[in-house]
Amino acid sequence: MPGRFRLVWLLPLLLFAGLVALMANHLGAPQQQVIKSHMVGKPLADFALEGVAGAPGLSLADLKGGGPVLVNIFASWCLPCAVEAPQLQVLKDRGATLHGIALRDRPQDVEGFLARHGNPFTRIGQDPGGRMMLAFGASGVPETYVVDGRGVIRYQHLGEIRPEHVDLLLAELEKAK
């Protein structure tokens, strides 16, 4: 009887532990990025954003006529934006031109964010109302786009840029030439 009693308690405990392990494994796995912008492959509409943090502003004219660039939509209040900051600097160091769009942020907060995490951007447009989210078809922050020299969105990266994404983004910039 004592062996049977232990089995009655041990079996549910093992099942529970297995369920917890399965859930922990699922939650720790990188999430599939499935919400894609309907704007990929389409030209951006005309826009002009005022500069922030001492940087010049950003407009469609700034994106046209040159080579492909990365446009990063970020916010000072966005934790993943802070996490990806070192990778943005790596992209800049490896030759990418980056422009930023500060989403729904106060200028002093953007300045503080860039002082803490670095400023890899050539231009930063201030978007206090969030209208550029619609223009790019963005679903959240951070999001990064490859925009070609004609102002057409060629690629969208959802979420924070991690070290393993750097080569992919550089390859997408190369494809957009």
Image (cartoon, rainbow, N blue to C red):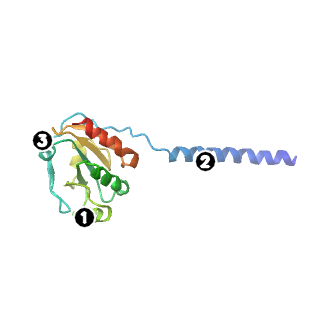
Could you say where residue 84 lies in the image, as x and y percent from the top left? 36, 53
- Give the Cα distance between marks 1 and 2: 43 Å
- For marks 3 and 2, the one nearer the N-term is 2
Q: Is residue 47 left or right of residue 32?
A: left
Q: Mark 1 against mark 3, which lies toward the viewer?
A: 3
**Horizontal relation, residue 127 to residue 36: left or right:** left
Residue shown at 20% from the left, 62% from the top: 53
Q: Which residue is mark 1?
A: 111
* Secondary structure found at label 2: helix
- The percent coordinates of residue 15 (x first, y second) are 68, 43
User: For the residue carrying disc 1, how many other residues have a C-alpha within 10 Å: few (<14), some (14-19), or many (20+)?
Assistant: some
- Mark 3 is on which residue type? Gly
Can you identify the residue that label 3 sits on? 65
Q: Position of residue 134 (x, y in %)?
A: 23, 43
Q: Are marks 1 and 3 in contact (CB under 8 Å)?
A: no
Q: How many marks?
A: 3
